[in-house]
Image (spheres, helix red, strand yellow):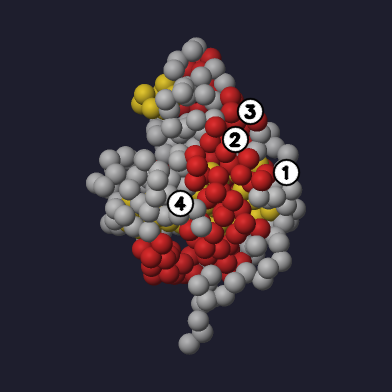
Amino acid sequence: MHRRETPMSAALDGVPAKVGWIYDRRFLDHDPGPSHLDLPERLGVIVGSLQRAGLLDAMDALPFRPATADQLSLVHDPAYVDLVRMMCDEGFTFIGSRDTCLGPRSYDVAALASGGVLAACEAVLAGRVQRAFCAVRPPGHHAEADQALGFCLFNHVAIAAEHLVRVGGISRVAIVDFDVHHGNGTQHLFESRRDVLYVSLHERPGSLEFPGSGSATETGSGDGAGYTLNVPLERGCGDTGYRQALERQVLPALDWYRPGFILLSAGFDALMWDRVAHLSLEPKSYRWLTQALVLAAERHAGGRLVSVLEGGYHLPDLGLAAVEHVRALLGY
């Protein structure tokens, strides 16, 4: 029997890939306040760590612009898009829930983040880069079609997936979400469809109160039945449990689906010291995890993969985890 190639059985070829880089200092202008978890400093830590590791110069900075209201409305209700803009203009300090904060620039920053992810996808489709890492904020995977939630205003990964299907001509897009929290918004946007496979590794509902979704029994509905895969993990789960979940569930699902493009909701909040959850990954865990997903993209999608920052709040380890992630994207 042919043995599937994985990072546990074979290494990448050692030739650095051409990887795009999405970042803008304007992402720091969304400021939810000094006591909030989604501090602007998160991006400063990531950029500084990548710079010290010599990885920024190894990536290609991609030009991008804010997503238009029409692009945001690929997955969000137009009235909701208008509401976010209006509430920022009118000086509201939160939307939906008190932990989803707003400032005068929050709409512009979130639209810029979505635009950056769209530009990364276009660059990969055009062959200008093989893969891309989008260091954007605020995060996106909790945002529903008509509701802000969990720090998220616009669902960047979902907007990108819809763009790839409608504009990019990709008939099968896979989203792999390894943020410690279930991506409720992304799942709900695609759970009745089969042109987008949603796969999520997260701490199990009940162990984490938020968002309360993501049980293994949630597998899609209607035409999308069987095209949602939730892999809930128990408290304390570390490398061994993640490797088992990857080998037994995530990679077989990707091999079955054979996506033409892979998007990652890259959360780094499953780290042992991150206080938002109870899982036990180390920064180095994100290298083999990313390598496995890069190899899946090589097998099925011509290597086409775009990674989008979601959570990750323990600043001392966040930068180290991002370095391991980008090393794997580069093929080091």
- Disc ID at residue 130: none
> In which image quadrant can residue 159 be found?
top right
Counting residues from the start of the chain, the first of labels 4 and 2 encountered is 2
Q: Residue at x 39, y 50 (%)?
A: 272
Counting residues from the start of the chain, the first of labels 1 and 3 encountered is 3
Residue type, mark 1 in image: Ala
Q: Residue at x 45, y 54 (%)?
A: 282
Point out the frontmost of discs 2 and 3.
2
CA gap, disc 1 and disc 3: 15 Å
Point out the frontmost of discs 2 and 1.
2
For disc 3, the marked residue is 26
Q: Residues within 10 Å of mark 4 (few under 14, many from 20)?
A: many
CA gap, disc 3 and disc 4: 25 Å
Point out the frontmost of discs 3 and 4.
3
Decide: is 84 above or below 328. above
For disc 4, the marked residue is 177
Q: Residues within 10 Å of mark 2 (few under 14, many from 20)?
A: some
> In which image quadrant can residue 62 be found?
top right
Q: Secondary structure at mark 1?
A: strand
Residue type, mark 3 in image: Arg
Furthest residue toward top? 90
Name the spot of residue 273 as percent of width and height, x first: 40, 46
Decide: is 152 above or below 257. above
Q: Residue at x 42, y 49 (%)?
A: 271
For disc 1, the marked residue is 61
Residue type, mark 2 in image: Gly
Is 304 left, or right, of 18 in this rendering?
left
Decide: is 56 above or below 27. below
